Image (cartoon, grey):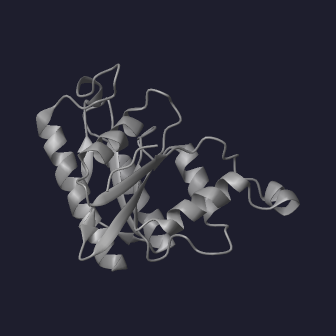
Amino acid sequence: MSFCQVVYNGCMTHILGISGSLRRGSLNTALLRNLAELSDEEVSMEITTLHGIPLYDGDLEDESGIPQEVKNLGERIKAADGVVIASPEYNNSIPGVLKNAVDWLSRLEEDVFAGKSFALVGASPGGFGTILAQNAWLPVFRTLEVHFWAEGRLLVSKAAGLFDVKTGRLTDEKTRQKLEEFIQGFAKFAADGEC
């Protein structure tokens, strides 16, 4: 978990970053960690992955209810002022593990999506930087009625060459500047929605 701290208009802004990749060396998890490091002292940013969330199964839900991991993630979303999803692009679309988590979360008794500030980022070793995955998220976000920050699209292409392999730290200064602008802009957007 990573934390940083920000106050806009007298409000502390808490951002939850959700990585849509389960891989230990995930470029998208690294992207979130770098966003957290680049946050100024007025934003707190927490990062989580989706480990432990089972495949959605209506029979499982009927027999056992909502899994505790899903409830815990729902509570973290509710507690945040805004959510940044780092979505990989698999086969030109949304990764199954991330869509699965959203499907489970939509089954919670209390709606954790409607009106909540959301933003998308994505890193890819390819040349298009998750643009197709980000486009595929738009109808999902419309359905969930999130407060989507469309101004800050952040696509990091050819990302494998932009991060230090051992530390996961961004080494490209131009990309670091984009990340810094992104997190500042989204924190202000999320704070405006909450304060």
Task: State the count of labels.
Answer: 0
| Residue 93 percent location from the top left of the image | 44, 46
Q: Residue at x 44, y 77 (%)?
A: 115
Closer to the camera in the image, 25 or 191: 191
Relative side of 74 to 20, left or right: right
Point out the image quarter for the C terminus: bottom left
Q: Residue at x 43, y 51 (%)?
A: 46
Q: Is residue 23 visible?
A: yes
| Residue 104 percent location from the top left of the image | 65, 59
Q: Is 132 situated above or below 146? A: above
Q: Is 169 situated above or below 191? A: above
- Extreme-bottom residue of the structure: 195
Relative side of 52 to 21, left or right: right
| Residue 84 percent location from the top left of the image | 38, 56
Closer to the camera in the image, 109 or 156: 109
- Extreme-right residue of the structure: 63
| Residue 112 percent location from the top left of the image | 55, 70
Q: Is residue 18 visible?
A: no
Q: Residue at x 42, y 57 (%)?
A: 137
Q: Quadrant of residue 128?
A: top left
Closer to the camera in the image, 140 or 43: 43
Closer to the camera in the image, 125 or 161: 161
Q: Is 163 situated above or below 77? A: above
Q: Quadrant of residue 135?
A: bottom left
